[in-house]
Every structure is written in C-alpha cells, then in structure tokens.
Image (cartoon, rainbow, N blue to C red):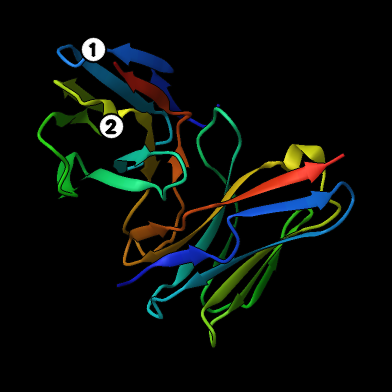
Amino acid sequence: GESVGLHLPTLSVQEGDNSIINCAYSNSASDYFIWYKQESGKGPQFIIDIRSNMDKRQGQRVTVLLNKTVKHLSLQIAATQPGDSAVYFCAENMYDKVIFGPGTSLSVIP
Amino acid sequence: ETGVTQTPRHLVMGMTNKKSLKCEQHLGHNAMYWYKQSAKKPLELMFVYSLEERVENNSVPSRFSPECPNSSHLFLHLHTLQPEDSALYLCASSQVGGGDLYGYTFGSGTRLTVV
C-alpha cells in the first residue's frame, strides 16, 4: 500500500558534523512534503516543507532535498547541535491527507 | 506554545474510569485531528474533523469517542480502556482547502497510562 518510510530508525552524529536523515515515499501523487521534529515530551513541530515542483529548499541550518524520480526525501542538518537530538518524521500530503513515516531518532554526541 | 493546547498533559486511569482529553487551537484552523503515538510506531490517525464534521474515523474502537463542539475545540472521551491503549495522544490542527498547502500544528500531547 501507500507508505512513507525511513531508511534508518536511529542515527548518531558527532556535535558539529552534518546530519542526513532519509525518507522514502511511494505515492507519486503526493504534492507536498514536510519534516517534523519531535523532542522528548513534546508534540511534533514543523521544521521545513517542500512542494513537489521544487527539488531543494533551505532553511536555517536545514535543507530538504526532494528526488521525485526515486521518490526520496532527505533532511540535512548542518553543524548538528545537542538541541537537534530528537525524533524526525517525514510526512507526505496528498489531497489534504497526510501520511507520516515511522520516524528516525537522532542522537548528537557532545 | 504552538497554538494548540492539550490538557491534561498526563493522565492515569483505571480500566473502568471515564475521562476526557481536551484540545484547543488558537490558530483559526478549520480542521482538527486526533493521533495516537505508541512507542516505536508511526503516528496513527484516529479521527479527523473538518469544518466541525467528522470526516474520518480510522476503525477506532468505540471506547474512544470524539467530540468537536466548534472549530476551536476537540475532545476525546475515554471509557473502559485497555492497558494497550496507553500511549501519547496528540491533537493537531490545520487549514484545509482553498488551494493552499499547510502542515499540521500539533499540541504537546496527553500521556495516557491505563492501569
């Protein structure tokens, strides 16, 4: 069936290094993608989004890349900080229906 | 504060109790959602209300009963729950329709423990 999945359930990175979190989606009709960050004890929070007519979007220290050919989405975090430790979810939006991936836990090693 | 407020933050209830979770959004959104988040599982959509009408019910057991009295408030009434219902219950809101694309704004959730 249609699904959004993450390649790695956990990721550990050294403070200061760049992090890359990957996401595969299977629904080619999805037109909008979002990355959420969920810190312990909190609900998911919007980080960055991208529409299907784009292949790259940059925010503050974060970049989302979209490869529609292989249905792949990635989140790049530059100069990872301890405050970036959280679970990251990708989500795809199709006709106002949002499908969430299972999440990747990012741990930052000081 | 995200603009979506959930109360209580934590709830412990027995299997014979009746309790309610409350969600309030201050964002002027026209859709509200209940999600269940269990450990190491994807977010599970439970209910969707759009313009105060329930538009989706994902085969949720009848011991969970949603209520949306207006576009700013959403409740989840709980009765005779099971221990496996212990989870984080997240409320979210969004603006749907109009041709624009928006993400969800989530509350901080209610951590429910059924004993």
Residue A105 position in % (x across, y down): 62, 48
At horizontal 17% and vertical 11% (from top left) the residue drawn is: B17
Residue B82 position in % (x across, y down): 21, 26
At horizontal 41% and vertical 73% (from top left) the residue drawn is: A30
Q: Amino acid at mark 1?
A: Gly
- Image quadrant in which you'd find residue B61: top left
Name the residue that disc number 2 marks.
Answer: B84
Residue at the bottom extreme? A69
Work out whether disc 1 and disc 2 sit on a shared chain: yes
Name the residue that disc number 1 marks.
Answer: B14
Q: Earlier in the sequence, mark 1 or mark 2?
A: 1
Which residue is nearer to you in this view: A71 or A61? Answer: A71
At horizontal 63% and vertical 78% (from top left) the residue drawn is: A55
Residue B87 position in % (x across, y down): 37, 31
Q: Chain of mark 2?
A: B
Work out whether residue B8 can be spotted: no
Which residue is nearer to you in this view: A36 or B11? Answer: B11
At horizontal 26% and vertical 34% (from top left) the residue drawn is: B71
Distance between mark 1 and mark 2 Cα atoms: 12 Å
Q: How many residues crowd around disc 1 within 10 Å: few (fewer than 14), some, or many (20 or more)?
A: some
Secondary structure, mark 2, is helix
Q: In the rendered image, which quarter contains the C terminus of chain B?
A: top left
Q: Is residue B66 left or right of residue B6?
A: left
Q: Is residue A51 above or below residue B13?
A: below
Residue B26 position in % (x across, y down): 42, 29
Secondary structure, mark 1, is loop
Q: In the rendered image, which quarter contains the N terminus of chain B?
A: top right
Work out whether residue B40 can be spotted: yes
Q: How many residues crowd around disc 2 within 10 Å: few (fewer than 14), some, or many (20 or more)?
A: few
Which residue is nearer to you in this view: A103 or B22? Answer: A103
